[in-house]
Amino acid sequence: MKRIVLYESGTGFTAQYAAWIAEELQCESVALKNAKSVNVAEYDQVIFGGWMCAGKVMGYDKFVKLHAKNAVLFAVGMAPAVPEVANKIIADNGFNAERFFYFEGGYRPEKVNFIMRTMMKMLKKSIEKKPEKTEEDLYIIKTFHGADNAKKEVIQSLVEFCKK
Ligand SMILES: Cc1cc2nc3c(=O)[nH]c(=O)nc-3n(C[C@H](O)[C@H](O)[C@H](O)COP(=O)(O)O)c2cc1C
């Protein structure tokens, strides 16, 4: 089966997951911004990963326009990889739950531009203001100082799904 992994990454976590997945599936991983020369129609399966920004999967809108066959999606965010987080992304974005995987990346404040950092500060403030914080909220607050929680082994569920 001919496969490719496409991704959109701001600070490197999604690129790392894309590279790990491509290594396991023995295919190429290409940043969406460099994929103009890729003929997506040639691939039997296209895996797309994007980083989470305010509840949205970055690059997904562009990816949809490619009309890839047999698409498998993953998203990478700073929120913990618990079912509640993945289910909310699925519900908010109308994804097919069977074909969507959520992985925890982390947060690299030093690589984020001024506008994004300002957005993050606002997000932090809004979480801090919540009278009742969930476990996820507390986790996200800790991660704001910077964290790398990416782990290669978590891609296995996606890799197995792709090979099925
Ligand atoms: C402006 C902004 C908004 C973000 N929104 C979310 C979010 O809604 N959910 C989440 O889990 N992480 C969120 N994050 C964290 C990133 O998704 C996280 O750092 C991810 O690992 C970045 O992946 P990348 O290194 O591939 O860019 C946000 C980060 C920024 C800068």
Image (spheres, grey):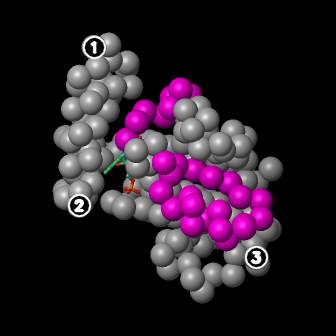
Say if residue 153 shows up in the picture. Answer: no
Q: Is residue 15 above or below residue 133?
A: below
The residues colored magenta run 56-85
Q: Real-space Cα distance between discs 2 and 1?
A: 30 Å
Q: Amino acid at mark 1?
A: Pro
Q: Nearer the viewer, residue 35 or 118?
A: 118
Residue type at tag 2: Asn
Q: CA distance from mark 3 to mark 2?
A: 34 Å
Mark with earlier residue (1, 3): 3
Numbered mark located on residue 41 in the image: 3
Viewer can see residue 88? yes
* 138 horizontally vs 82: left or right: left
Is disc 3 surrounded by few (<14), some (14 to 19) or many (20+) residues within 10 Å? Answer: few
Q: Marks 3 and 2: which is nearer the front?
A: 2
Residue carrying label 2: 113
Residue drawn at point x = 57 percent, y = 83 percent: 36
Instruction: Please rate how many residues cluster around mark 2, counting C-alpha atoms within 10 Å: few if below 14, some from 14 to 19, many from 20.
Output: few
The residue at which mark 1 appears reads as: 131
Q: Secondary structure at mark 2?
A: loop
Q: Quadrant of residue 49?
A: bottom right
Determine the residue positioned at 37% across, 41% down: 78
Q: 139 left or right of 71?
A: left
- Name which residue type carries label 3: Ala
Name the residue rendered at 40%, 36% in the picture: 79
